[in-house]
Amino acid sequence: MKGADHRIKQKEAGFSKSKVDLSGEVGTYTLAIIKPHAVAKGHVHDITERIKMSGFSIKDSKFVHLSTEEAEEFYAIHSGQEFFERLTMSMTSGPLAALILEKHDAVRSFRALIGATNPAEAADDTLRKQFGESTVLNALHGSDSDQNALREVNFFFTDSGSADQK
């Protein structure tokens, strides 16, 4: 995204520039990523509205264009899987929206909201069913544990994290 379009999309999504204190109760925060193909298709506003309507607060957010090295680091757990190259290529294809979400039992609640990895198998009322196209182009990433949520938030939102806003 470039120039004014980027700023407009950030404002529409309710994106903030504030620093977030994640010292609250364990299980209160999770990382959400609106993947590049969903950003490119203009789904950021609709997805963030559904997230907020589901009781989440968006504590911080930013657009990031990952390098190949950053995508490989972020998804290192999947290294060696047959889909790894397609996943990292899709995650570097354009800017993504990274969001810190807050809600009691955030990880479980967000994973229920996004649905199954394969949109064809996701429940009808889930975000992946509505916005996903395939297992790799499934519109969203959500942390799978409280421990990974903290690691993933730090990856995108700390000065020492790997992904810089671009």
Image (cartoon, helix red, strand yellow):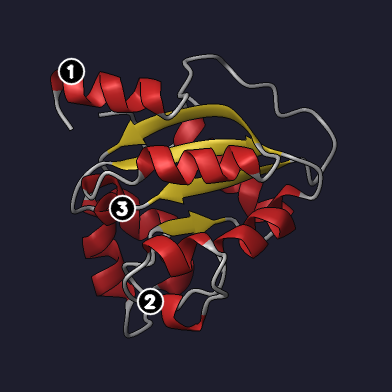
**Picture layout, residue 6 above or below residue 127:** above
> Secondary structure beneath disc 3?
helix
Residue 1: give x, y in percent of width and height. Answer: 18, 33
Identify the mark at residue 155; answer none if there is no mark.
none
Mark 3, other Cα within 10 Å: few <14 / some 14–19 / many ≥20: many
Q: Amino acid at mark 2?
A: Thr
Residue 164: give x, y in percent of width and height. Answer: 34, 31
Q: Which residue is mark 1?
A: 4
Mark 1–mark 3 Cα distance, whole angstroms, equals 19 Å
Q: Which residue is mark 3?
A: 38
- For the question of whether residue 32 can be seen, the reply is yes
At 43% from the left edge and 75% from the top edge, which residue is drawn? 119
Q: Amino acid at mark 3?
A: Ala
At 38% from the left edge and 66% from the top edge, which residue is drawn? 138
Instruction: Look at the numbered discs 3 and 2 and tell me whether their residues touch, using CB distance below 8 Å.
Output: no
Mark 3, mark 2: which one is toward the viewer? 3
> Secondary structure beneath disc 1?
helix
At 38% from the left edge and 76% from the top edge, which residue is drawn? 135
Identify the mark at residue 135; answer none if there is no mark.
2
> Which of the marked residues, 1 or 2, is nearer the chain's N terminus?
1
